[in-house]
């Protein structure tokens, strides 16, 4: 009996330490905590709009950081909500995390960056953790082994993250993260992040994966079952115009168009070569770029919405 009693204090200390780490990562301080908070803020915005017809825009950060929802709303005359999240959550988790917000009459615009379109299994580095953070562990069909391993690791914050938080508390009196900036009343980011590294053109080395095509097809069926309509869009990207990239994007657009109406500039394929339009990544846009993108989306969406 003595041995178990000796282990007990260590066990209690381990559970307490894991709990503190979990609380840091999921609820306050860790990057996942800010992503979780932003998600629930966006869901609250969508739920607050009672109109019979809304435009819900979703995807990864290539949707979140590229929109001017107010301009789109003014151009289309219907409420717009930016439900864009984070690419590493994975397509298989992003889509079911927003489907419950679709109501009869809604238009859902999916703008997936190529990170999501080319993924062979629909899961990313944050898939399991995000599901746990929003109270839906296993969301998107995350395998039990991955879910268990990632959940355990949620109680072990990285030394770098903890050190960063400690410095911020000491110097600023608060902790921040990539997604900790406030969002607008339509879910758009309110802070512009700029790139410090040198720009290079992003290649697209393969067309849409079979898994991504099948998952988006299923999403269309889920949207329609709830009385909504799905529209797809190629993302704006600061990309290469080499033959391989052009071929793969054309194939991607072709396969997407077989699933649902797909909007993009037929000449440029949404490949942009002016780096001044982009913020900190090959997908995120500066305010000027967001304005241009919003106006383009309005012109592309109008005919489809009016026909519906």
Image: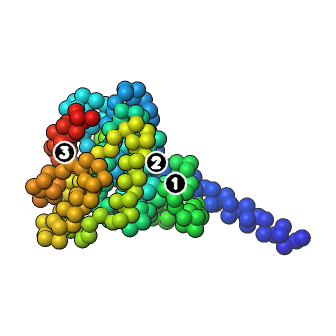
Element carrying mark 3: helix
Q: Residue 244 location in percent, x, y?
A: 17, 71
Taking depth in this image into account, of 65 and 254 the one nearest to the observer is 254
156 on left or right of 233? right
Q: Upstream in the sequence, badge 2 or badge 3?
A: 2
**Label 1 close to label 2 by CB (< 8 Å):** yes
Which disc number belongs to residue 97? Answer: 2
Residue 41, placed above or below residue 74: below
Q: Is residue 29 left or right of residue 73?
A: right
Q: Marks 1/3: CA distance?
A: 31 Å
Q: Secondary structure at mark 1?
A: loop
Quarter that holds the N terminus: bottom right
User: What residue is pinned by disc 3?
Assistant: 293
Percent coordinates x, y for residue 114 in the rendering: 29, 61
Q: Is residue 239 visible?
A: yes
Instruction: State the separation of the CA atoms marked 1 and 2.
Output: 8 Å
Q: Image point 25% across, 53% down: which residue? A: 257
The residue shown at (46%, 49%) is 96
For the residues carrying marks 2 and 3, which lies nearer the camera in this image? 2
Image location (x, y in percent) of residue 68: 24, 39
- Give the residue drawn at x 13%, y 66%: 241
**Distance from the alpha carbon under mark 2 to that under mark 3:** 25 Å
Q: Position of residue 192 (x, y in %)?
A: 26, 47
Residue ranking furthest to the top: 51
Image quarter hosting the C terminus: top left
């Amino acid at each position: 009996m003595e041995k178990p009693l000796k282990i007990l204090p260590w066990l209690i200390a381990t559970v307490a330490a894991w709990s503190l780490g979990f609380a840091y990562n999921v609820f306050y301080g860790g990057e996942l905590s800010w992503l979780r908070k932003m998600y629930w803020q966006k869901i609250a915005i969508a739920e607050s709009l009672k109109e019979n017809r809304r435009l819900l825009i979703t995807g990864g950060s290539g949707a979140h950081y590229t929109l001017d929802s107010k301009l789109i709303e003014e151009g289309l005359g219907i409420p717009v909500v930016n439900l864009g999240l984070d690419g590493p959550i994975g397509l298989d988790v992003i889509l079911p995390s927003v489907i419950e917000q679709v109501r009869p009459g809604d238009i859902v615009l999916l703008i997936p960056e190529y990170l999501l379109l080319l993924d062979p299994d629909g899961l990313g580095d944050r898939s399991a953790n995000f599901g746990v953070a929003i109270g839906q562990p296993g969301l998107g069909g995350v395998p039990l082994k991955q879910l268990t391993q990632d959940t355990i690791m949620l109680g072990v914050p990285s030394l770098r993250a903890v050190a960063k938080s400690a410095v911020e508390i000491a110097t600023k009196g608060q902790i921040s993260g990539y997604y900790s900036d406030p969002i607008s009343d339509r879910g758009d980011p309110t802070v512009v992040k700029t790139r410090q590294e040198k720009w290079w053109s992003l290649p697209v080395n393969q067309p849409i994966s079979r898994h991504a095509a099948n998952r988006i097809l299923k999403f269309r069926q889920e949207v329609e079952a709830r009385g909504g309509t799905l529209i797809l869009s190629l993302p704006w990207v600061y990309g290469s115009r080499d033959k391989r990239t052009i071929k793969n994007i054309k194939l991607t657009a072709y396969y997407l168009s077989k699933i649902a109406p797909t909007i993009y500039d037929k000449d440029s394929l949404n490949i942009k070569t002016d780096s001044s339009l982009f913020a900190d990544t090959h997908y995120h846009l500066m305010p000027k770029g967001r304005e241009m993108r919003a106006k383009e989306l309005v012109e592309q969406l109008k005919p489809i919405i009016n026909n519906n």
